């Protein structure tokens, strides 16, 4: 075929799949685009590409850098190798302590990652938050509720206020006079007192009953000693002869405490109600000194009465009841004027301030409470003992409270600061009773189940001496009003009188 005979054929333009070229022209030339051209489907619709959720690539970069920095911090965090400590920390953070198939190494890494997110001090902050929450809950639980009392209580509070204010003035004036004394005089007085206490020795010992002697106390004139026994008998003894004067019969269960009226043996007649006692069966009895039978019964206690105490005026009597309360009885009105709650467990002991304006109670809940008798408010909460408080007393200055506990320790509380002043690891067993020396307030006497009694200086709280001689645990102790005698009673059924040898030479 010659080149001249070659025929040129014009080829139609082909639109390939995926190409958008000439789509508009095809649309004009093809009235029915929906049918397509050949096997190619052509549509006027177009697809819009979805935009990225984060149009700013710098944010993605920032997140990556932050994650890298977090992992870097995680590698630098020190985590305990003790698996139990790791579990404890995870529990503190509120995380599961173990995941399925997780080993100690994986658990450490998980804790490290958590700390890198929450901060290295997350565990400490969590502990502090828990402690604050527990403290708030405790403060809420310790809230004292007050109720309106009868008219007799209002009269009693007014009477106590009128009585205590002059007493407080006299006490403050006496303390000011004592503070004005020269330091040399104070030092000489203190040295003389310490020398006297170091010379204490047993003056007399007496078997008082066939059962353990639970309590002993001196009369206001320091010439009579009263004892209570688990046999239910109360006895009066002469001092220092230790001769039995009288047996008080009336209780049918263990006597817990016996107390003299503040004016007994001084200005009261022997036929008056000079003593009060309480027992385990809830009975409280009033006694005279010239009869063996009780003068009257203070009724109203349904359970054990552990301790009782006279108000300094002698008009009121406080009883500690094992129904978590203590009662205040008006002996002139012959009725109960106050039923005070506030302890979460049994109230075991109580003591009045020398002015008579305040009272402090100690309970088996390990707490003490200071009550203002003029208003009824709890003005101080004594928190610090690990076990129940079973011995409590006021200092002669009216500012300090001394407590003895079942945790073997004694604590000194300052009412002015409303805080604890000193803790004394006093004994190796339960501290059964504590007594301040009333005439000068220079020392404190403590008795314990470790078969000993100890003396402590009231300013420095240092030990001054130890009284040993009983064969068994001491149940109680007391100091005479004139400061010349110390009495201790024991589970061994005896009581002992202690005094300085110098006083008899």
Image: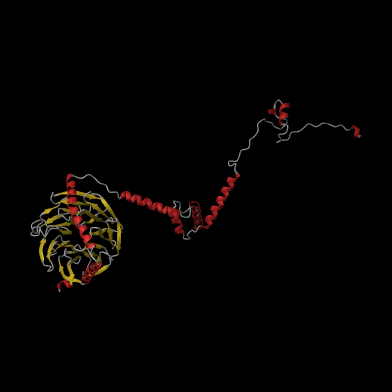
**Residue 416 in sight in this render:** yes
Q: Quadrant of the C terminus?
A: bottom left
Give the farthest residue toward the bottom: 505
Picture coordinates of residue 184, whole percent (x, y):
24, 68
Q: Identify which residue is drawn at 58% across, 42% down.
A: 54
175 to the left or right of 112: left
Count of marks overlaid on the render = 0
Picture coordinates of residue 27, whole percent (x, y):
71, 28
Q: Identify which residue is drawn at 18% across, 44% down.
A: 150
Which one is in front, 189 or 272?
189
Q: Quadrant of the N terminus?
A: top right
Quadrant position of residue 195: bottom left
112 to the left or right of 258: right
Give the farthest residue toward the top: 31
**Residue 396 in sight in this render:** no
Picture coordinates of residue 183, whole percent (x, y):
25, 67
Which one is in front, 167 or 253?
167
Which one is in front, 78 or 333?
333
Quadrant position of residue 187: bottom left
Q: Identify which residue is drawn at 56% across, 52% down.
A: 68
202 versus 140 height, above or below: below
Picture coordinates of residue 425, whole percent (x, y):
30, 64
336 versus 178 height, above or below: above
Which one is in front, 130 or 422?
422
């Amino acid at each position: 075929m010659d080149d001249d005979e070659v025929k040129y054929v014009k080829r139609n333009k082909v639109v390939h799949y995926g190409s958008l070229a000439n789509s508009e022209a095809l649309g004009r030339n093809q009235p029915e685009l929906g049918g397509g051209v050949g096997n190619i489907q052509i549509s006027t619709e177009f697809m819009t590409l979805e935009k990225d959720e984060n149009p700013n690539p710098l944010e993605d970069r920032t997140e990556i850098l932050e994650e890298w920095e977090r992992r870097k911090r995680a590698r630098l965090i020190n985590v305990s190798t003790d698996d139990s400590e790791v579990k404890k920390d995870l529990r503190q953070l509120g995380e599961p302590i173990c995941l399925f198939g997780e080993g100690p190494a994986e658990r450490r890494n998980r804790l490290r990652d958590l700390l890198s997110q929450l901060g290295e001090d997350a565990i400490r902050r969590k502990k502090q938050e828990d402690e604050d929450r527990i403290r708030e809950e405790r403060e809420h639980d310790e809230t004292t509720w007050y109720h309106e009392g009868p008219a007799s209580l209002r009269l009693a509070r007014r009477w106590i206020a009128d009585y205590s204010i002059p007493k407080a003035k006299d006490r403050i004036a006496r303390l000011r006079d004592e503070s004005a004394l020269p330091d040399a005089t104070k030092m000489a007085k203190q040295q003389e007192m310490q020398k006297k206490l170091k010379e204490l020795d047993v003056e007399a010992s007496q078997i008082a009953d066939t059962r353990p002697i639970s309590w002993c106390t001196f009369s206001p004139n320091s010439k009579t000693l009263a004892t209570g026994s688990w046999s239910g008998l109360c006895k009066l003894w002469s001092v220092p002869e230790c001769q039995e004067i009288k047996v008080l019969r009336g209780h049918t269960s263990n006597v817990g405490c016996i107390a003299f009226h503040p004016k007994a043996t001084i200005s009261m007649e022997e036929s008056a109600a000079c003593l009060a006692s309480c027992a385990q069966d809830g009975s409280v009895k009033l006694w005279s000194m010239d009869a063996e039978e009780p003068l009257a019964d203070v009724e109203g206690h349904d359970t054990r009465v552990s301790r009782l105490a006279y108000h300094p005026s002698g008009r009121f009597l406080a009883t500690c009841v094992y129904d978590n309360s203590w009662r205040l009885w008006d002996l002139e009105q012959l009725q109960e004027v106050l039923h005070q709650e506030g302890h979460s467990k049994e109230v075991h002991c109580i003591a009045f301030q020398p002015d008579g304006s305040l009272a402090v109670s100690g309970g088996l809940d390990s707490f003490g409470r200071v009550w203002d008798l003029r208003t009824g408010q709890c003005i101080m909460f004594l928190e610090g003992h690990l076990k129940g408080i079973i011995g409590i007393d006021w200092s002669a200055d009216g500012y300090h409270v001394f407590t003895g506990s079942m945790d073997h320790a004694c604590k000194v509380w300052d009412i002015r600061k409303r805080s604890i002043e000193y803790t004394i690891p006093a004994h190796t067993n339960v501290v059964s009773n504590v007594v301040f020396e009333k005439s000068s307030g220079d020392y404190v006497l403590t008795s314990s189940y470790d078969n000993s009694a100890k003396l402590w200086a009231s300013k420095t709280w240092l030990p001054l001496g130890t009284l040993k001689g009983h064969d068994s645990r001491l149940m109680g102790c007391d100091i005479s009003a004139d400061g010349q005698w110390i009495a201790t009673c024991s589970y061994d059924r005896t009581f002992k009188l202690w005094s300085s040898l110098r006083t008899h030479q």
